Image: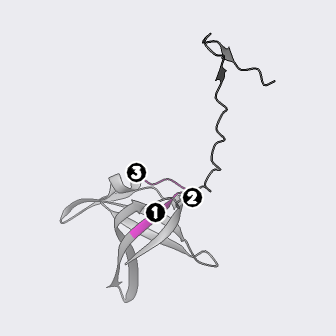
Amino acid sequence: MEFVGKVLEILPAVSGQSARGTWERQTVVFEQANKQFGKEIAVTFMNKAQDVAMLRVGESYTVSFDIESRKYMDKWYTDVRAWRVQPQQPQAQPPMQDMPPFMEEPQPQYSAGAGVVDDIPF
């Protein structure tokens, strides 16, 4: 799944150790685009410090993500985990209107035989 959103906040990274090794998690809060009333989504980036480093608050990105739920001590927890982030391409500017053609400049008149330019308009 994916959505387009503007970065509202980048939270500090959290790291730790597990049976599988060292891990790092960082949460980024996005505001979904194209919604009448902004919906915020907290997206988790697991071991993707390089992806988070390229994000800028206020910029829009396309976020590809998976949703994962798990049960712990009779409570359910849900994560929105990003697996790809791409900068949102700026909207194409409308094409400029065609400019009117340039007026041709009058060519100078030469005097007969002298090779002198007569550019006086009278």
Residue nearest the viewer, comparing 113 with 35: 113
Quick one: which residue is furthest to the bottom in this view?
Answer: 74
Residue nearest the viewer, comparing 14 with 63: 63
Quick one: which residue is furthest to the top in this view?
Answer: 114
Residue 80 placement: quadrant? bottom left
Task: Find residue 105 and report its horizontal and vertical position in percent.
Answer: 66, 33
Q: What crowding class fits label 2: few (fewer than 14 Cα within 10 Å), some (14-19), or many (20 or more)? A: few
| Distance between mark 1 and mark 3 Cα atoms | 13 Å
| Distance between mark 1 and mark 2 Cα atoms | 25 Å
Q: Nearer the viewer, mark 1 or mark 2?
A: 2
**Residue positioned 38% across, 63% down in the render:** 85
Q: Is residue 59 magenta?
A: yes
Q: Is residue 34 magenta?
A: no
Q: Is residue 40 left or right of residue 53?
A: right
Q: Earlier in the sequence, mark 2 or mark 3?
A: 3
- Which element type, helix, strand or loop, lies under badge 3? helix
Task: Find residue 59 and report its horizontal and vertical position in percent.
Answer: 52, 57
Q: Nearer the viewer, mark 1 or mark 3?
A: 1
The magenta segment: 53-63
**Residue positioned 37% across, 89% down in the render:** 74
- The three-letter code of the residue at mark 2 reads Pro
* Residue underneath mark 1: 61
| Distance between mark 2 and mark 3 Cα atoms | 34 Å
Q: What crowding class fits label 1: few (fewer than 14 Cα within 10 Å), some (14-19), or many (20 or more)? A: many
Tell me, for residue 99, which label it has, or none: none
Residue nearest the viewer, comparing 34 with 46: 34
- Which element type, helix, strand or loop, lies under badge 1? strand
